[in-house]
Amino acid sequence: MKPPKPIYSFLAAAILAAITLVTFAVFQDYGPQSAIRRFHRAVLRKDGAEANQLLAGGLNSPEGQALVNFVDEIARSSNSYEIVGMRRDRGAVVASVEYHMPNGMAASRVWYVRKQGGEWKIDAFNTLTGIPRQLFGG
């Protein structure tokens, strides 16, 4: 039996790479991590429509406005942020986010995200208070 020609190996690798890139491109804005990332980006760009879509209670709630103010302040005073842990249960996620400050210190916030109408939404009340109310159906 003859070994495959090198061109076929390169072609197979190129097709696999293309499939991988398309998969990541399609799903980059899906999931609870994406909701947190997109919310931060929307607040920094002052994109109220995007931020409103990502909040379970919308921007008109006091909690929604307070969360926008928090993100605006912490994101501008930190170098970066990172989701360092997640707990999933039945359409809800608790995510631990660390904000890395210029002085080397880190500030943390627990974010509550839940699936609502097939989309991941940030629960501003739970995120601000740290007291989950029926997040995991309990």
Image (spheres, rainbow, N blue to C red):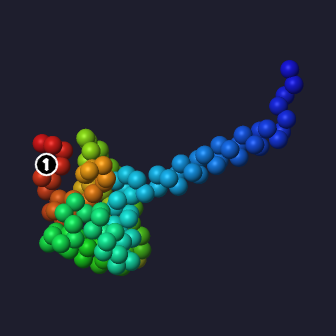
Q: Residue at x 50, y 53 (%)?
A: 26
Q: Residue at x 25, y 41 (%)?
A: 90
Report whether residue 56 is seen. Answer: yes
Q: Residue at x 17, y 59 (%)?
A: 126
Q: Residues within 10 Å of mark 1 (few under 14, many from 20)?
A: few
**Left of 29 or right of it: where is 55?**
left
Q: Amino acid at mark 1?
A: Gln
Q: Position of residue 12 (x, y in %)?
A: 72, 40
Residue nearer the viewer, 83 or 50: 50
Q: Is residue 9 above or below residue 83?
A: above
Report whether residue 70 is seen. Answer: no
Quarter of the image with the N terminus is top right
Residue designated by label 1: 134
Q: Residue at x 38, y 77 (%)?
A: 45
Q: Position of residue 123 (x, y in %)?
A: 21, 59
| Residue 40 location, quadrant | bottom left
| Residue 58 location, quadrant | bottom left
Q: Position of residue 24 (x, y in %)?
A: 52, 52
**Left of 115 or right of it: where is 15?**
right
Residue that sits furthest to the right in the current view: 2
Q: Position of residue 11 (x, y in %)?
A: 75, 43
| Residue 130 location, quadrant | bottom left
**Left of 118 or right of it: where is 136?**
left
Determine whether the residue tagged by mark 1 lies in a helix, strand or loop.
loop
Total labels: the figure holds 1
Q: Is residue 6 above or below residue 104?
A: above
Residue nearer the viewer, 3 or 61: 61
Quarter of the image with the C terminus is top left
